[in-house]
């Protein structure tokens, strides 16, 4: 994996150049991803989120079994994101497969990328016990939950902006269900490093947001 100070286009190039010989294919996919993540409808699920997840995984690089596949999953996992749909992960995985068909990855590794993307749909679902790469991806994806109070409230408001077409009373009900489901999970983070660092602040932040919605909103 690569240094966290490297720009995202440079990271993409470093990741995909060994996989795809045709520079036009690599650049076209980067443009498509940039257009998606830079959409005016995005407020949290942007390239900033992608960078943060990549950065977190970089700090745990020694634990990854297949960093190339995990990084590809990160780049594509929110590529297609419409808050009004429930098939975003499946659609993002399909988009990844269209690009991966141009790579020299084996069919098994291409399918693994899709599998990782689709597992991000529900972080509270039971996960395979021995899949460290999956656990690290899921933990990095939820790293935002354990940040400082100020950064968490910024995240919560950004998510609300992405659902701006949903009336407050409907969003409040749906968001409370999400928060309650996360808080009811035995653990939020699967790996010891993330759990030791973020489990307590994440639960504190989630409880604070839940209280805010119970009192009328954020």
Image (cartoon, rainbow, N blue to C red):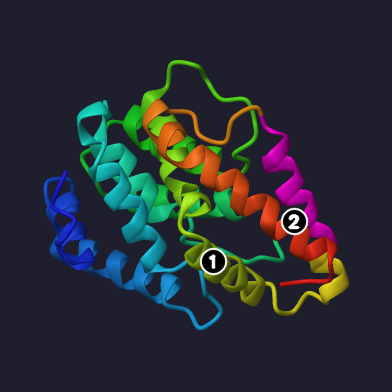
Number of numbered discs on residues: 2
In the image, is residue 138 above or below residue 9? Answer: above
Q: Residue at x 54, y 66 (%)?
A: 155
Q: Where is the N terminus found, in terms of image quarters? A: top left
The disc at residue 210 is 2
Chain part drawn in magenta:
173-185
- Residue 211 within the segment the image draws in magenta: no
In the image, is residue 98 above or below residue 9? Answer: above
Cα–Cα span, label 2 and label 1: 14 Å
Q: Residue at x 66, y 65 (%)?
A: 83
Q: Position of residue 43 (x, y in %)?
A: 52, 74
Of tags 2 and 1, the one toward the viewer is: 2
Q: Is residue 20 visible?
A: no
Q: Relative to residue 151, is residue 64 drawn left or right? A: left
**Nearer-the-camera pick, 161 or 106:** 161
Mark 2 is surrounded, within 10 Å at the Cα level, by few (under 14), some (14 to 19) or many (20 or more) other residues, namely many
Work out which residue is located at the far right of the displayed protein and give it: 169
Element under disc 2: helix
Residue ID for mark 1: 155
Q: Quadrant of residue 196?
A: top left
Q: Relative to residue 158, is residue 130 drawn left or right? A: left
Q: Quadrant of residue 211?
A: bottom right
Q: Is residue 155 visible?
A: yes
Q: Relative to residue 52, is residue 200 drawn left or right? A: right
**Nearer-the-camera pick, 160 or 87:** 160
Q: Position of residue 28 (x, y in %)?
A: 27, 69
Mark 1 is surrounded, within 10 Å at the Cα level, by few (under 14), some (14 to 19) or many (20 or more) other residues, namely some
């Amino acid at each position: 994996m690569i240094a966290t100070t490297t720009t995202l286009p440079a990271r993409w190039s470093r990741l995909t150049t060994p996989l795809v010989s045709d520079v036009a294919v690599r650049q076209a996919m980067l443009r498509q991803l940039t257009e998606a993540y830079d959409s005016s409808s995005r407020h949290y699920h942007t390239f900033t989120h992608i960078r943060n997840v990549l950065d977190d995984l970089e700090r745990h690089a020694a634990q990854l079994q297949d960093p190339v596949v995990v990084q590809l999953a990160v780049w594509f996992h929110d590529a297609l994101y419409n808050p009004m749909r429930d098939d975003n992960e499946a659609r993002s995985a399909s988009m990844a497969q269209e690009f991966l068909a141009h790579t020299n990855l084996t069919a098994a590794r291409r399918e693994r990328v899709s599998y990782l993307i689709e597992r991000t749909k529900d972080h509270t679902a039971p996960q395979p016990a021995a899949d460290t790469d999956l656990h690290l991806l899921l933990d990095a994806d939820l790293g935002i939950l354990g940040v400082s109070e100020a950064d968490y409230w910024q995240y919560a408001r950004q998510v609300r902006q992405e659902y701006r077409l949903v009336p407050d009373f409907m969003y409040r009900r749906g968001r409370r269900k999400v928060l309650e489901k996360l808080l009811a999970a035995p653990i939020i983070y699967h790996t010891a490093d993330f759990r030791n660092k973020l489990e307590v602040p994440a639960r504190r932040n989630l409880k604070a947001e839940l209280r805010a919605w119970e009192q009328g909103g954020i």
